[in-house]
Image (spheres, rainbow, N blue to C red):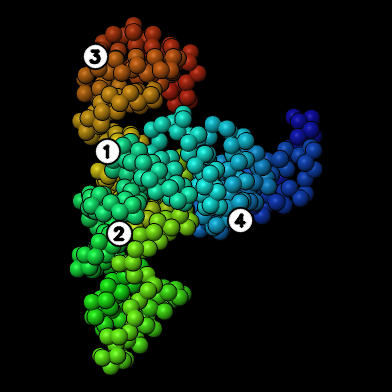
Amino acid sequence: MKFLKKVFGLGKDEDYEEAIELYNNHMYRKAIERFKKVIENKDPSISLHHRLSHFYCGQAHYNLGLMFFAMSDFDKAVVEFENAVKFRPNQVEIWEYLGICYNNICEYEKAVNAFEKVLDAEPSHLPARLKLGIAFHNLQMWDKAISICQEILKTHPNYADVYFHLGLAYLGQGKPSDASLAFENALKINPRYKEPRIRLGITQAYLGNLDEALNHISLMLKEFPNYSDLHYYLGIIYASSDEVPKAISSFRRALEINPSFSESRVKLGILLYKARKFKEALNEIEEASRLDPGNKNIHMILEHVRRQISLPEKISKEMPGITHMDPTDDEMIAQNIHDFNKHLEIVPNFSEMLSIMKGFSEENASFYEPLISIVQDSVAQHPGYADLHSSLGSLFFKTKRYDEAEKAFKQALAINPEYLQARINLFRTFKVEGKLEAALKEGQYLFEKGLPYPDFHCSLGEIYISLKMFDEAEAVLQSALEKKPNYARAHLVLAQLYENMGDKDKAISQLLKCLDSNPLKEHKLEASEALLRLRG
C-alpha cells in the first residue's frame, strides 16, 4: 500500500475530498475552485488526485454549461463549455453543445468548426451533420446546406426534419418550386409536422397558388386554433388576395392570442389606415412601436399616420399611402420567405439533453424543478411542439410526479401519434403507476411497431405476468433474447414467469443463465435470492 501511495500520490488530500463533496452536492462553482487548487499543488506525473481533479474540473464546467443550456442562456453556456473542452478536448458531447450555442448566438463559423470536430470523431453522427447543415444555412452557404441534406437523405430517406431544412435552403437559393417539393416530402413522412406545412403554405402563396396556400394554413388552424403565427400568416395570404376584411379579422385573432405580436399589430394598423380608420390605426401602430421600439420601419409608419391625422380631411385624402410593411404589397410574401431564413436557431432537444444528464441524482429535485418551469414556459409559447410536451413529461417522471407526466406524454401523442419515444415513456409511466391495462395497450402497440429494445420487451413481459397472460409473456421474453442473447434481465423475468406457472426446473434453469450473463448488481442479488428460495 505504501508503494501504491508513493507511485500514485494517494493518501489524504483535504482539498480533493472537499472538492468531491461539493461536486456530489452539485455545487459546481465551488468544486471547480477546489479542484483547481489540487491541480496547482500536485505533480501531474505522479498524482492521481491531480488527474482526477483535472477530469472533474472539466465535468463540473460541462454540468454548469448544461444548466445554462437548459435555460437557453447560450452566452453563459458557451463560457462553461469552452472551459470544459480545455480539460476534455476529445469529448464529443461538449463540442456538439458548443456548436449549438455558437449557432444560436450567431457565431456561425465557430459552430461549423465545432460540428466538424464532432463529425471527425464520429462520422456517422447524424444529428451533428444536420446541425452542421443549419450552420451553413445561416452563413447563406446554400449549396453546402443542400448538399448535407441530400447526403443524409440517401441513407435516411424518411427523415422529415431533413426535408424541412432542405426546403428552407432551396428558399434561400431562390428556388421556391424545389422548396415546395421538399416541404411536401416532409409532410408525406409526418402529416402533422407544423413547420413545413406553414412554409409550404407561404411558398405556395409566393408562387401565386393562393387557394392552396389558404388550404394548408387553414388545415393547420383546425389542429392548432390558438397558434397566433398561423392567424398571422392567414392574414398575410388574405391581404395578398385583397380580402382585406378577412385579413383584418385574422390579424385581430392573432393579437387576441398573443397581444405582444408586434408584426401582426403593425400590419393590422396599416390595413386600418388604408380603410381610413386613422385613430384605430394609430392605436395599433403606437402599441407596435412600444413593443418594438428599435424598429425604424414601424417608427416611420407611426410618423406618417400621425401626420395624416393632423391634416385637414381634404389634404389628408391626397396623402400617399404607406409603402413599408404593407401586407397587401406583392413583395410582402417574398419578405416573409426571406424572414424564414434570417437566422435558424437550433432548438435545444430537451429529451436528448436529459438522457445525457443521467449522472445527476434523480432525487435532486432542486436541479430538476427549475427545468420544469423553463419547459412549461416553452410549452406555453409553442403548444404544438410534441418534443416539448414529451420533455416536460420526462422531467415530471424524474421527479416522480407521475400524474403530470402521464398528461404531458398524452399531449405529445395527441400532437404526433407516431412519436414512439413519448409512447415508450407513457408505457413506463402507466407501469410505475400500476395502471397495467393501460400499460398493456401501449406496450402491445409498441411491440407491433417492432420496437427493437430488449429492455422494453422485458417490461412488457412483466405486465403480461402480472395479468397472468403467461403465453404472451413467454413469447415477448423469448423475443428479447432473440434480439440480445444472454440478456440477464430477460432470463430473470423468464424465471419469474416459470415460477408463476409452477415449473420450478425451468425457473431454476433461467436463474442460472441469468447469473452466467454478467447481470447488474440488483439482478444478480434478485436471481441469487430466488435460486436459494427455489432450491430450499
Left or right of 158, for residue 357: right
Going from N to C along the chain, the mark reached first, 2 or 3, is: 2
> Relative to 440, does residue 227 appear above or below in the rendering?
below
User: Disc 4 designates what residue?
Assistant: 79
User: Disc 1 designates what residue?
Assistant: 417
> Relative to 153, does residue 225 appear above or below in the rendering?
below
User: Disc 2 designates what residue?
Assistant: 233
Instruction: Write the residue at 26% across / 28% down.
Output: 445
Q: CA distance from mark 3 to mark 4?
A: 56 Å
Quadrant including the C terminus = top left
Going from N to C along the chain, the mark reached first, 2 or 1, is: 2
Q: Amino acid at mark 4?
A: Val
Going from N to C along the chain, the mark reached first, 3 or 4, is: 4
Question: How far across and how far down the image is residue 168, in percent?
Answer: 43, 48
Give the number of the mark in front: 4 or 1: 1
- Res. 228 visible in picture: no
Instruction: Write the residue at 42% across / 74% down.
Output: 297
Q: CA distance from mark 2 to mark 3?
A: 55 Å
Which residue occupies the extreme top position in the image? 505
